[in-house]
Every structure is written in C-alpha cells, then in structure tokens.
Image: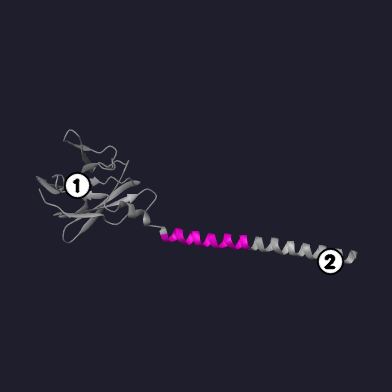
Amino acid sequence: MTNLKILKSKSAQAELITTVLLILISIAAVVLVSTFVINMVRENLRGTECFQTTGQLSINVEDGHTYYNETVDGTVTTRYVYLSIERGTKDFNMSGFSVIFGNDFTTKKIQLMGGTSDSTIAFYNSSALWDNVRVLELPMPGEMKAYRLNITSYGISGVNKIAVSPMIVKGPECEKVDEKTIPTK
C-alpha cells in the first residue's frame, strides 16, 4: 500500500512539474514573439513622424514677402530670397525647416534650425523692418514669419522656385510640403 501511495505521489509531482514547465515555455515563447513583433512594428513605423506635418507648413506668396531680389552696387551683386512661411494650427515638434530654392537649371538647399544664429538670415519684425537674426525663431502653430536669406555665396541667380520641408526633433527631414513659383522684384 505504501508503494502505491509513493507512485501516486510521484505521478502527481510529475504532472505538477510538467504543468509548470509548460507555463514557463509558454511565457518564454510569448516574450520572444512579442520582442520580434514590437521590433518589426517599430521599424515599419520609422519615418511616419512626417505624416503630422502634411499641410502644416506653407509658403505665402500673397502677402508680398516671398520673392527673389538681386541688387548691384558697383561690382558687387547681392542676391536675396525673401520667404514668408505660414504654419498650420496642428502642433508638432518642429526643430527647423529646409528651404530649397532654384531656377530652371539648378537648386540649392539651406537648413534653418530653430535657436541657432546665422548672419545671412534676417526676419521681418513687428516694426516692419528687417532684423538680422540673433536667434532663429520658427513660426509657432497658427503663426506666419517672414525671412530674408542672403544667397549670394550659393552662386545661383534668377531664382524663380522655392520649396520648404519641415524637420522634426529627433526625426528625419520630411518631404517638401509646399513648393511655389516666386516673382523677382
């Protein structure tokens, strides 16, 4: 009789150990599969940060502050692109924007990063004057800002096209969100 009790006891222990092992194997399998799936989803979602910028940054040519200008003073030619940027009301974490400008043959790109300073950039202030930028201010949601870019050193003249693409904090530079033909003044 005691042998029968021992066999039943060992059988019960074996079933318990088998159950615990199956649970542990199941948990390990869930951890492995979830790690794989999470990494795969994260990889596939990379770059989707730019979806939130669609329609949220535009070039305003109607206000008269977006145009190309070339001045000649003796033998010195200075070239400027004037640009009015309007930001939509949707809030996204914009770190700056790229300005792509050119003519029918050549294009160049300038990256304007918020909080930086650049002596070749000026902004249109509330006193209707152009101030050299001490710290570059980006337009806030629902705001418009006008910039003057000295592009003389880029060696391009006759600029008639301009485009902008936003840059996201800790993210990629997004595709062009607006492109316009601009006048010469």
Q: Is residue 41 left or right of residue 185?
A: right
Please tell me the numbered disc located at residue 171.
Answer: none
Q: Residue 136, how many percent across, how many down? A: 28, 41
* Observer-nearest of 28 and 165: 28
Q: Are marks 2 and 1 in contact (CB under 8 Å)?
A: no
Q: Amino acid at mark 2?
A: Leu
* Observer-nearest of 91 and 148: 91
Q: Amino acid at mark 1?
A: Leu
Q: Work out which residue is located at the far front of the displayed protein and give it.
A: 1
Q: Which residue is mark 2?
A: 7
Label 2 or label 1, whichever lies nearer to me, is 2
Q: Residue 86, how many percent across, how many down? A: 23, 46
Magenta-colored stretch includes residue 39? yes
Helix, strand or loop at label 2? It is helix
How far is mark 2 from mark 1, CA to CA?
88 Å
Q: Which residue is mark 1?
A: 83
Magenta-colored stretch includes residue 74? no
- Establish if 87 lies above or below 23: above
- Establish if 158 lies above or below 124: below
Q: Quadrant of residue 24?
A: bottom right
Look at 23% across and 55% down and name the residue there.
108
Q: Residue 144, how many percent across, how many down? A: 22, 42
- Establish if 51 lies above or below 94: below
- Establish if 41 lies above or below 147: below
Which residues lie in the magenta part? 26-44
